[in-house]
Image: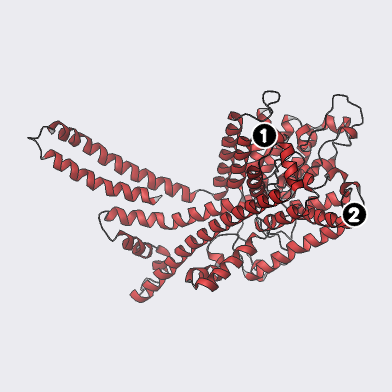
Amino acid sequence: MSNLVHLAHKIKPLFNSCCSKLASLSHHPFYSLSKLANKVKPFFNSSCTIFCSFFSYFCARISRLNPFWFQLHYFVVLSVVGFLALKCSKPKTAPAFSPKDLDLFFTSVSATTVSSMATIEMEVFSNTQLVILTFLMFVGGEVFTSFLGLLFKASKSNTGEENRVVSANPDSENSHTQIELGLFLNNPQILDENPNTSLESGIKSFGNVYLKHNSIRFLGHVVLCYLLIFHLGGSTLISLYILLVPSARQVLKQKGLQVQIFSVFTTVATFTNCGFIPTNENMAVFNKNSGLLLLLIPLLLFGNTLYGLCLRLVIWVLEMVTKREEFGYLLKNYGELGYDHLLSSMNCLCLAATVFGFILVQFVLFCSLEWNSEALSGLNSYQKLVGSLFQVVNSRHAGEIVVNLSLLSPAILVVFIVMMYLPPRTSFFPTREEKSTKTNNKKFVDYLLFSKLSYLAIFITLICITERDKLKEDPLNFNVLNITLETISAYGNVGFSTGYSCKRRVKYDSYCEDKWFGLVGRWSDKGKLVLIVVMFFGRLKNFGNEGGRAWKLS
């Protein structure tokens, strides 16, 4: 961003020089042009000054903006833009069926917050709308938003000092060197620590500051390559699988889906842990394609719960191969960079133990209770094992399904609710630095805030109020357990839902038609609006107190 200011300072003396040369050509036929240049010159100079002042003010305001409000505006604006794009593009079923505006906005919010809560069947959307949803999921994913944070952090660490140095001498050919030196000379932290700093120690301190700034840039490059490799590799492998396996290719042919669009959409949705799949049945239509399910499991883990572990492993490998000092700095000074996903080696081990421990417990419980149930009927033993593993891995934050959740036992649903509530970086093995965290510097407003469970209880109560008539008339579909699962799923940005079945209605309705979307699709408009708030609240839950350390569930 600061390059714009530098460019304005470069253009200003060049324009003044051109004006002076034109003014000296009074005998030339283009004398009128020189008069015009003299009139424009003060206007241009003042415009440059105003632009530089405004841009510096804008950067300063952005740098002081609370990250919570910054991300809230980001997701809200992105959701509105996504809604307008979906509204302008025609669905596949038009003109026979066109979704309501509220359902389109709900879908846009669901994709942006990677929640995958559905009020519309996915096969309603056209290829253009699927591309729009793919873009929303990608830019709303946790890894991409953290990458944007790194870019902002790198520019913020250099913008203020660079502007001051460039404005002092914009014509200098060694401006880059001055910028680097300005990082030291204008850094009050270095000068205040020791007023009598010698030149040697000052240069050393400047080297540390420059190394930190350079390490942030390297970290941004690593995260960007991490994104590209997993998305390109994942979509390529999925495309190859579909082309090589006739049964999977036949499914897409029957549903009129292109292999390329399905592969890219599924890769982005899986890596971002959104859970949207461009088929009505989600991944249940591929429950016998065990190879495809096994391809998606690593994307599910490396895009969310195990991202911190994989990122540190990648940096460690790069440091061993390249011997670059920046990678070593990232491994040793992970806490100073302010990037939440960069963890210590002990934290990574504890996180991995927690993630695989949860998977193991859920897998054993799921197989014990559901092995011979209707949910897994029609599958052989190998397909049941892979399907069960895929389902329990999705219970944390992804939300893709291979079974009908309404057919599962209540005990499994309760376990899923607990798993969906826990943040991605949950670890039940607190490390030494986490134990020593000070909590006595709270503001007064922190004591007035409710816990997350309290907010969720309020949301569930509000939804029970908005859907109170349906709770009385249709208690098998609309019950407190199903509403709780739907709400916690929206808060955890998961997307699990028991759905709605006309067969479970107490009163027979000949006009009732089963649809492949979540239970929220049958809610009133007020209930959907409440769940939209829950999805935003869940996407920003990391800003809560101790959002990443959740062995205390409150």
Which amino acid type is shown beneath numbered disc 2? Trp
Q: Earlier in the sequence, mark 1 or mark 2?
A: 1
Asked whether disc 1 touches disc 2, contact meaning CB atoms under 8 Å apart, the reply is no
Label disc, if present, on residue 380 of the rendered structure = none
Compared to 471, does 15 lie above or below?
Answer: below
Colour scheme used in the picture?
secondary structure
Rendering coords of residue 414 (x, y %): 84, 50
Compared to 178, does 254 lie above or below?
Answer: above
Viewer-proximal residue among 154 and 376: 376
Rendering coords of residue 146 (x, y %): 57, 54
The residue that appears at 88% across and 51% down in the rendered structure is 411
The residue that appears at 88% across and 44% down in the rendered structure is 407
- Residue that sits furthest to the left in the current view: 27
Locate residue 86 relative to residue 278 in the image: left or right. left
Which amino acid type is shown beneath numbered disc 1? Phe
Residue marked by disc 1 = 125
Mark 1 nearby-residue class (10 Å; few <14, some 14–19, many ≥20)? many
Residue 443 visible to the viewer: no
Locate residue 423 relative to residue 20 in the image: left or right. right
Q: Locate residue 195: give its quadrant.
A: bottom left
* Secondary structure at numbered mark 1: loop
Residue marked by disc 2 = 371
Distance from Cα at disc 1 to Cα at disc 2: 35 Å
Viewer-proximal residue among 125 and 13: 125
Rendering coords of residue 172 (x, y %): 26, 58
The residue that appears at 53% across and 61% down in the rendered structure is 222
Rendering coords of residue 123 (x, y %): 71, 35
Specify the quadrant that holds the C terminus: bottom right
The residue that appears at 31% across and 46% down in the rendered structure is 8
Compared to 363, does 541 lie above or below?
Answer: above
Viewer-proximal residue among 143 and 239: 239
* Secondary structure at numbered mark 2: loop
